[in-house]
Amino acid sequence: MAPPPKRRLSAESEPFPADPLQHAMASRDKDIMSLVRNALASGSARLAFQPIVLAKQPRQIAFYEGLVRVLDDGGRILPAALFMPLVEEMDLGREIDCTTMRLGLEMLRVNPALRLSLNVSARSVGDGAWRRILDEGLARSPHIGERLILEISESSAMLLHEVMIRFMAEMQPRGVSFALDGFGAGMTAFRHLKDFFFDIAKVDRCFVRDIDTSPDNQVLAQALITVAHQFDMFTVAEGVETQEEAAVLRQLGIGCLQGYLFGVPKFSL
């Protein structure tokens, strides 16, 4: 007697996807997002502070950048690079921005001498919950706006540039400053640059790395600094890790320096 024919599994009935690596990555991403959601719900998110120093006076801190850190159930830090690319276009990304803004405004309230920059996406600027947190914080302490810097990435600024331009115009009278994060990496259309109200341009770390031995990076960084100065923007170099890099950047006319050479992000100021 012939054996019964083997039943073909449909895509829905297969126990694993065709690509085991894809399945593993999808499971990992799902676990990470669950950890982030749980951490936000339990109040297990904190800000770490990295100093930005004056290029010519590196012992003098110009301001700090507040970087959100999410802690798991064991108190271990989940690196932002692990989850931000997964959530920045999702509602979870808006929740992270809301938490960042809430924590940042509280730090500014209890530290009257603190000047702080916080990252925000253009999508959050149009989010009602995020906007209420910002407006209520500025209303409670009107002078906080003068010590708040909002960092917008190039790609985010260009995504909803009309929304960003209107928002910046609203915030300028309240003292809030704006920094263009990762300047050069996202290739912001220069025709739009004059329409924004950026006060600071942060030269992307890809132009800073090994700048002391890379003539190409020297030329590109010099060009970005020149463009920033043309639009009356103060300049910051990101990702500075060696004294040699810092020395070249000073020669090119950079205003401030940020990187592990001058301090890693810490929970305490």
Image (cartoon, helix red, strand yellow):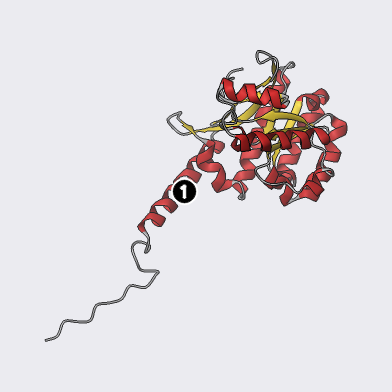
Residue 50 image position (x, y, % from top left)? 61, 24
- Density class for disc 1 (Cα within 10 Å; few <14, some 14-19, many ≥20) is some
- Give the answer, above or below, for where 161 lies relative to 268: below
Residue 267 image position (x, y, % from top left)? 56, 22
- Give the answer, above or below, for where 55 lies relative to 84: above
Quadrant in the picture for residue 219:
top right
Q: Residue at x 66, y 24 (%)?
A: 257
Residue 78 image position (x, y, % from top left)? 49, 35
**Residue occupying the far front of the picture:** 215
Q: Residue at x 62, y 50 (%)?
A: 89
Q: Quadrant of the N terminus?
A: bottom left
At label 1, which amino acid type do we have?
A: Asp
- Give the answer, above or below, for where 73 lies relative to 53: below
Name the residue tied to disc 1. 29
Q: Quadrant of the C terminus?
A: top right
**Residue occupying the far bottom of the picture:** 1
